[in-house]
Image (cartoon, grey):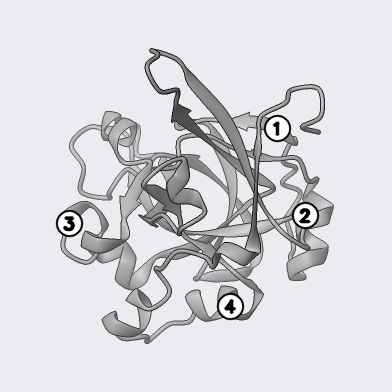
Amino acid sequence: MCGSFALSAKTKDIEKLKSLNSNNYEFEPKTNIFPLQKIPIIKNTSKNELSEANWGLIPSWAKDKKIAKSLFNARAETINEKPSFRNSFKNKRCLIPATQFYEWKQVPNSKYKEKYTISVLNTKIFFFAGLWDIYYDENKLPILSTTIITTEANTKMSAIHNRMPVILLFDTQDLWLENGLTNDELKSFLKPIDDDFILINKFNENLNF
């Protein structure tokens, strides 16, 4: 799963990396981002814009927006089968910028867990594969929401956890946002990043940023 990540970059850094227009949206860099908080995304329907979304998907047909609490991750293996994600997987995909994410490892013979940071080598900002949707609340106001897609862990990550977010490298980021792709083409993106591209460190609050 992916239940916490960081985005220490400023809006202008993301804009420069992807040639975006934030439309006066300014994201405040954060070292700890959790589900139900607001995060920036790049939607497939507006590839040159940075939009603000709630982390935790609320499908357009949902009866209650509280469903977001359980839909902050989408499993790659069943993403095209689950009603909550099926339509968004086909039509509403996005990129979610990050600078690192966190995972916890159970300490043997203990009730404690150790925290680890995972980043991508040779780039400060990387992108998760995500989905988005728009839900209209009781006041008919739109809520843009998103979820991070997860997949099985690569060999290096599996020493800590059996799941990890789908990380798209530069050559696949724009392709993920293309329209008209088949289900098989889309599923081909949803695999663990190669071991050689990630760096894992035990969390050290004093050295983290």
Badge 3: few (under 14), some or many (20 or more) residues near its Cα, within 10 Å? few
Instruction: Give above or below for 45 relative to 25.
Output: below
Q: Residue at x 70, y 32 (%)?
A: 30
Left or right, residue 30 beside residue 62: right
Q: From the viewer's perspective, is 15 left or right of 188?
A: right
Mark 4 or mark 3: which comes first in sequence? 3
* Residue 124 tag number: 2
The local secondary structure at tag 1 comes to strand
Q: Nearer the viewer, mark 2 or mark 1?
A: 2
Judged from the image, the secondary structure of the residue bearing numbered disc 3 is: loop
Question: Given the image, on which type of amino acid does mark 2 rest?
Answer: Lys
Amino acid, disc 1: Lys
Residue 116 on image: x %, y %:
59, 34
Circles 4 and 3: CB distance less than 8 Å?
Answer: no
Report the disc number at residue 174.
4
Q: Quadrant of residue 133?
A: bottom left
Q: Give the image quarter of residue 125.
A: bottom right
Tell which tag, 2 or 3, sits nearer the viewer. Answer: 2
- Three-letter code, disc 3: Lys
Q: Quadrant of the C terminus?
A: top right
Question: Marks 1 and 3, Cα distance to the nearest angstrom?
Answer: 31 Å
Look at the numbered disc 2 and give the secondary structure of its residue.
loop
- Residue at horizontal 38%, vertical 51%? 134
According to the picture, the residue beneath numbered tag 3 turns out to be 82
